[in-house]
Image (cartoon, rainbow, N blue to C red):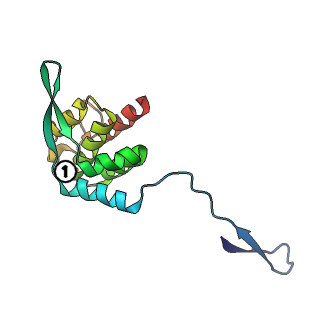
Amino acid sequence: MFLLYMGVALLGLPFVTAQVQVAPLPRTVRTLPEEVERDVRRTVYGKPLKFGIVARGSLGVTVVIIPKPIVDAYTGHPREVVRLLLRIADGAPPRDSMRAVACALALVDAPNGGTAVTCVLGFKESEYDALDSDWAQTPRQHWIAEVRRMEKGK
């Protein structure tokens, strides 16, 4: 709690001071523990993405391998991790943004994961923040919107 001092002056009346106690607002949005957020950020900013092949029937499907710290964080805090990845994707340099959005796509598109592969393989650093005429937005904006769309579908 903190104290708020309020003053009132009406039509030449003397200034009156009142003391009011204001309680802090309850936390309505869950946030990630600091160490979890630090691990996710360190992983996104410091590690290149890897691919793997997963058997689906008689076919092998290429998937993005999500780094373990991000998987561990997502297991305990799925929405918060996706929100953090989207914040990183929105403000980071292109290559880091692409890694963040690819991890988010792989998480929300699981077990398919094909969209994340498309994001990574189509990545061109010089075009990431340039308007794409087919999408009518930048690739960064497109992939962030795609994560949000998929997340709503879950």
Q: Residue at x 25, y 40 (%)?
A: 139
Residue 137 rendering spot, x and y as whole percentages: 30, 38
Seen in the picture, residue 7 relative to 89 is either above or below; the reply is below
Q: What is the number of callouts on the image?
A: 1
Seen in the picture, residue 24 relative to 3 is either above or below; the reply is above
Residue 125 rendering spot, x and y as whole percentages: 16, 47
Q: Could one spot residue 82 in this view of the protein? A: no
**In the rendered view of the protein, which quadrant contains the N terminus?**
bottom right
In this view, the residue farthest toward the top is 58
Q: Amino acid at mark 1?
A: Arg
Q: Secondary structure at mark 1?
A: helix
Left or right: 109, with 17 as reference point:
left
Q: Could one spot residue 34 in this view of the protein? A: yes
Q: Residue at x 17, y 54 (%)?
A: 47
In this view, the residue farthest toward the bottom is 14
Callout 1: few (<14), some (14-19), or many (20+) C-alpha neighbours within 10 Å?
A: some
Seen in the picture, residue 137 relative to 88 is either above or below; the reply is above
**In the rendered view of the protein, which quadrant contains the C terminus?**
top left
Of residue 99 and residue 91, the one placed in the foreground of this image is 99
Left or right: 139, with 19 as reference point:
left
Q: Quadrant of residue 117?
A: top left
Left or right: 37, with 134 as reference point:
right
Q: Residue at x 34, y 50 (%)?
A: 73
Q: Quadrant of residue 25?
A: bottom right
Residue 60 rendering spot, x and y as whole percentages: 12, 25
Residue 109 rendering spot, x and y as whole percentages: 31, 32
| Residue on which disc 1 sits | 95
Q: Residue at x 27, y 37 (%)?
A: 106
Of residue 143 and residue 105, the one placed in the foreground of this image is 105
Seen in the picture, residue 154 relative to 144 is either above or below; the reply is above
